Image: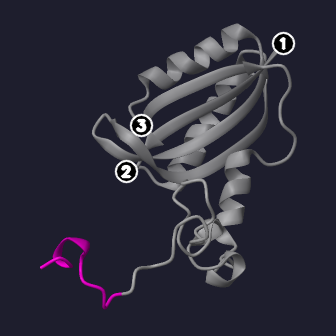
Amino acid sequence: MALYEHVFLARQDVTAQQVEELTARFKGVIEANGGSVLKTEYWGVKTLTYRIRKNRKAHFSLLNIDAPAAAVAELERQQRIDEDVLRVLTIRVEELEEGQSVMLQKRDRDDRGDRGFGDRGFGGDRGFGGGGGRGFGGDRGDRGPRRDRDEAPANQENE
């Protein structure tokens, strides 16, 4: 049997409990067709890059599947029929990741809340001025000294 990573997006109107019920139902479809779901992850409600069927947000869920191709085809057919499922992506992989997926690791890192201005300096990891990608670190060493503010502009000196 082949290994698959399967992600589906559910409408934002449904509750997290209903998404868990959808996941259990889809897991049953896989198991009824001779496969097994090795891991399920609920990634939460996330903002979509663009609207899908008038939805700006969606519930994201991941299923790691070990099943024949016919079982995955039946799963996708069931999901196309379901009005709560907005989008589906199935990828065949050589091996499945152990532990948490990158999405859950990112959410854990973001939830820590111990990142403040003191950790990396004001303005993030680029320093106070932001850097802006100009190729220098924000110091004025490569520019000349500032002009004295009491000086008259160069074009008015001769008057």
In the displayed structure, does residue 18 sit left or right of residue 100? left
Nearer the N terminus, badge 1 or badge 3?
Answer: 1
Judging depth in this view, the residue of 26 and 89 nearest the camera is 89
Disc 2: which residue: 13
On residue 31, the disc is none
Q: Position of residue 125 (x, y in %)?
A: 65, 67
Nearer the N terminus, badge 1 or badge 2?
Answer: 1
For image coordinates 47% across by 30% down, the residue present is 87
Q: How many marks?
A: 3
Q: Farthest left residue?
A: 159
Q: Position of residue 77 (x, y in %)?
A: 52, 16
In the displayed structure, does residue 77 sit left or right of residue 86? right
Judging depth in this view, the residue of 81 and 91 nearest the camera is 91
Q: Quadrant of residue 27?
A: top right
User: Helix, strand or loop at disc 1?
Assistant: loop
For image coordinates 36% across by 39% down, the residue present is 50
Disc 3: which residue: 84
**Are there few (<14), some (14-19), or many (20+) residues within 10 Å of tag 1?**
few
User: Helix, strand or loop at disc 2?
Assistant: loop
Disc 1: which residue: 1
Q: Quadrant of residue 106?
A: bottom right
Q: Where 79 sits versus 110, above or below?
A: above
Which amino acid lies under the numbered mark 2 shown in the image of this protein? Asp
Which amino acid lies under the numbered mark 3 shown in the image of this protein? Asp
Q: Position of residue 40 (x, y in %)?
A: 72, 41
Which amino acid lies under the numbered mark 1 shown in the image of this protein? Met
C-alpha distance separating marks 1 and 3 = 29 Å
* Magenta range: 149-159
Nearer the N terminus, badge 2 or badge 3?
Answer: 2
Q: Where 105 sits versus 79, above or below?
A: below
